[in-house]
Amino acid sequence: MIVATNKDDVDPMHKSTSPKRKSFRLFAIASAALLAVGSAGALIAGVTPATAASLANHADTQIAVFMVPLTILLVAILYEAARIALRGNLPVEAPARRAAGRYWSPDRGEG
């Protein structure tokens, strides 16, 4: 019986973490740090939920809160559509993976 002592011994072709996953982890850490710094800055500046709620009563603020994210989403969609269209070809879908076959063994009273 062979016992693997190292994680790399099990499958030498398997990489533990892909570069895309590492960049996503870095992005998640950076965005969490930015959120923490922004929250701390708002608390130091004296912004409280009560003052934020009083700002939300103005019609211009309500429109901005709705329209700014919607506009950013629209620009992102248009950018992606233009990027795909200017590339000239559509991305090819990956072929579906075949399910791994299960080994069959007879139960009691079978075969």
Image (cartoon, rainbow, N blue to C red):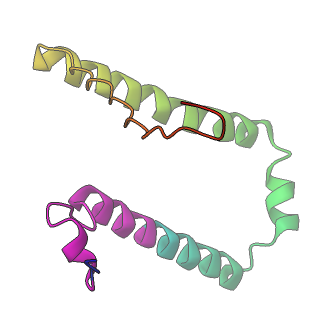
Q: Quadrant of residue 1?
A: bottom left
Please indicate whether residue 21 sits to the left or right of residue 66 in the image.
left
- Return the x and y of residue 82 as percentages of the image width and height: 24, 19
Q: Is residue 2 above or below residue 51?
A: below
Q: 61 or 20, which lies in front?
A: 20
Q: Quadrant of residue 38?
A: bottom right
Q: 87 or 1, which lies in front?
A: 1
- Return the x and y of residue 8 as percentages of the image width and height: 21, 75
Q: Is residue 71 above or below residue 55?
A: above
Q: 87 or 102, which lies in front?
A: 102
- The answer to whether residue 11 is magenta is yes
Q: Is residue 30 above or below residue 99?
A: below
Q: Quadrant of residue 29?
A: bottom left
Q: How many marks?
A: 0
Please indicate whether residue 31 sits to the left or right of residue 82 in the image.
right
- The answer to whether residue 7 is magenta is yes
Q: 37 or 99, which lies in front?
A: 99
Q: Main secondary structure of the magenta part?
A: helix
Q: Kindly identify the residue that appears in the image at 57 percent across and 77 percent down.
A: 36
Q: Which residues are magenta?
A: 5-30
- Return the x and y of residue 31 as percentages of the image width and height: 46, 66
Q: Kindly identify the residue that appears in the image at 65 percent across and 41 percent down.
A: 108
Q: Kindly identify the residue that appears in the image at 81 percent across and 43 percent down.
A: 58
Q: Kindly identify the residue that appears in the image at 88 percent across and 66 percent down.
A: 50
